[in-house]
Amino acid sequence: MTDTAWKTLEPRLMELGPDTGAPGPWKAWRLTRDEDGIDWLIADQPGASANTVSEEVLEELDQILAKVEQDAPKALAIRSAKAGGFFAGADVKAFVGARDAHEVEQRMTRAHEVVDRLAKLSTPTVAVIHGYALGGGLEIALACDHRILVGDEARLGFPEVQLGLHPGLGGTARLLDLIDPLDAMQMMLTGKAKRPGEAKAIGLADALTEERHVKAAVSAVARGEFSSTKPGRLGRLRHQVTERILHADLPRRAAADRMRSQAAKQAPPQHYPAPGALVDLWERHGDDLKAMRKAEIASFAHLMTTDAAQNLIRVFFLREKMKRLTEVEAKAPRHLHVIGAGAMGGDIAAWAAWHGIKVTLADLKPEIIAQAIGRAATLYPKLGHDSAKTRDALDRLIPDPDGQGVRHADLIIEAAPERLDLKRKIYADLEPRMKSGAVLATNTSSIRLEDLAQGLARPERLIGIHFFNPVSRMQLVEIVTHEGVADDTLNLAKAFLGAIDRLPAPVRSTPGFLVNRSLTPYMLEAMVMMQEGVAPETIDAAAEAFGMPVGPAELADQVGLDVGIAVADSLKAGLDKPLPVPPDTLRAKVTAGDLGRKTGKGIYAWKDGEPQKAKSFAKPTQEMTDRLILPMIDACLECLRKGVVEDEDIVDGAMVFGAGFAPFRGGPIHYAREAGAQTLKARMEELAVLHGERFRPDQGWERLT
């Protein structure tokens, strides 16, 4: 919710249930009856920035519903006092370490009783939603008779699939009962949230309104005069026809098979069981939604106790931990200047401008700046459907071929090619023109900051802010420090990443930092295997068998073969043991200009952004998988041993969010502990005998054994 909208809403919420400081009957809720006989139930968990659906919250809700049943109001309106939204979902902490499915089933049965009680109220109920209503929060809203969305920032969704789960508070059946079954299943299987217009179009929301009209809308509900904004006649007809067809076993079974096939392409069922479990639930009980709600409990309880769900929940908390690193006293920069408008620099500038920061974008070639702004104009409508937001972001993205923005910028990011001499030359020109207190950041992916800092008058103002490609999709950013960096420099970098919704991974300056250092042996080993005659499709399949979302051959093409070789060459000097040598055939591709996806040809030919892989190829062996994955884990342990990263959780989070390490395994260090460090270390020793010194285990394994 925007600041302006919140300032309008907040006094109204205080009027409905002021917090006088006196102890009330409930901690997380305030209940007030207004002059029209309408009860306003305000969710406001103390000490939290967002409401979550915990067992305590539900127990208090049960007490409130008992009161409402005894003294019925004309209507019950439920809304949130949090600026961000309605409910952020369930309290995930409650299920960390859950391994007893029977215990989870008992807890969920009790939670169902409360939500079912809300659904059965004779009093008209309405959920008034601003901001997000996710997971268990949306399930509370679905148990109400009506859903009214306030403003244009509402987001309604079921992200449980990202935690290895499906909705568990009756949401599977209630959503299927409310909207078209195929729309409902798609929404739950993808975890994608619906915007207000989309929610209204499919019947998930009854009405969209502004804050000033909320009271009138709820009063209309109380009088029985509320006019819902339902899908049009064709939409209702489609829903009815689809529902009637899918009520029969054979059509529902056929639709379920298609759903499983589509879901498996994104989330292999052997690694991510939740989509398949949801489809099974619908296939078996789609013609009896009461039975489906009951079966949902057992299915949810089973999923909760799987390794996949527990590890994905771990990844959820890794993300939260990394987000908290941005909570510093420093203010985010108001003006960013970016040097280099290529693929990285231009996209960094575009992303920052979208998030409200004024950006000046410089490059030696004006046409490169124009191309970057063109990419931004294409990206912004995909990020948000509000044309005004796109216009405002483009207004903040200012072409600056002469580099005049340097004098006014709080933060300057250099995104020039990976050449030490070039970067030093840029810094020599920049530093005298920077304003006092400004921070200079480099987006280098492999050059040591100590080398870049030579010749600077104020090396304490230099820091690394290393983004990954594509900037708009990769959440991780490495914050690279050197021995002399100032605290306020580091804090400004963290504040900047918080302002642009990115996850920081603090790392020490060393060749390759963390992610590139750990990914390079993975990718180079793939090249060695190709030199041995193994098909790239087989190599990629070996990595995907472990759970990597993208195999190393395809990833090398995505990154760019020229970039991969440059990183590998720059890492050699600083390592304790040898890296695989990039094969001559790979260098020949680079010389020929076949750099991967960006040129349309590399290891694979590329068409419409997709690699053209052979349909038939040899199946991978376990040894292939071990040769790819174990050196990556070994490099992570080396980084911990050397103090490149201080925290195992940050290593795990960085590798999941920056390198795509199989999320359902919880991160490389967590996986090594769970799989048995002694076993994995012994396997590396076997590989060292078979394939060479590069597989010799690092001393860092000792921390796990």
Image (cartoon, grey):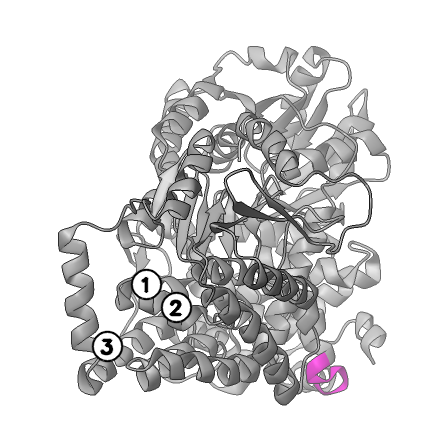
Query: Label 2, on which residue?
Result: 174
Give coordinates of residue 360: x percent, y percent. Answer: 53, 19
Residue 179, can we see it? yes
At mark 1, the secondary structure is helix
Query: Label 1, on which residue?
Result: 178
Q: Using a 10 Å C-alpha cutoff, classify the residue at mark 3 as few (fewer than 14 neighbours), some (14 to 19) or many (20 or more).
A: some
Q: Using a 10 Å C-alpha cutoff, classify the residue at mark 1 as few (fewer than 14 neighbours), some (14 to 19) or many (20 or more).
A: some
Residue 339 placement, left or right of 258: right
For the residues labelled 1 and 2, the Cα–Cα distance comes to: 6 Å
Viewer-nearest residue: 116 or 45 = 116
Q: Which residues are magenta?
A: 674-680
Residue 697 placement, left or right of 169: right
Say what amino acid the circle numbered 3 marks.
Ala
Considering only vertical position in the picture, is 27 above or below 490? below
Give coordinates of residue 37: x percent, y percent. Answer: 52, 44
At horizontal 14% and vertical 60% (from top left) the residue drawn is 237
Task: Give the dominant element type of the magenta stretch: helix, strand or loop.
Answer: helix
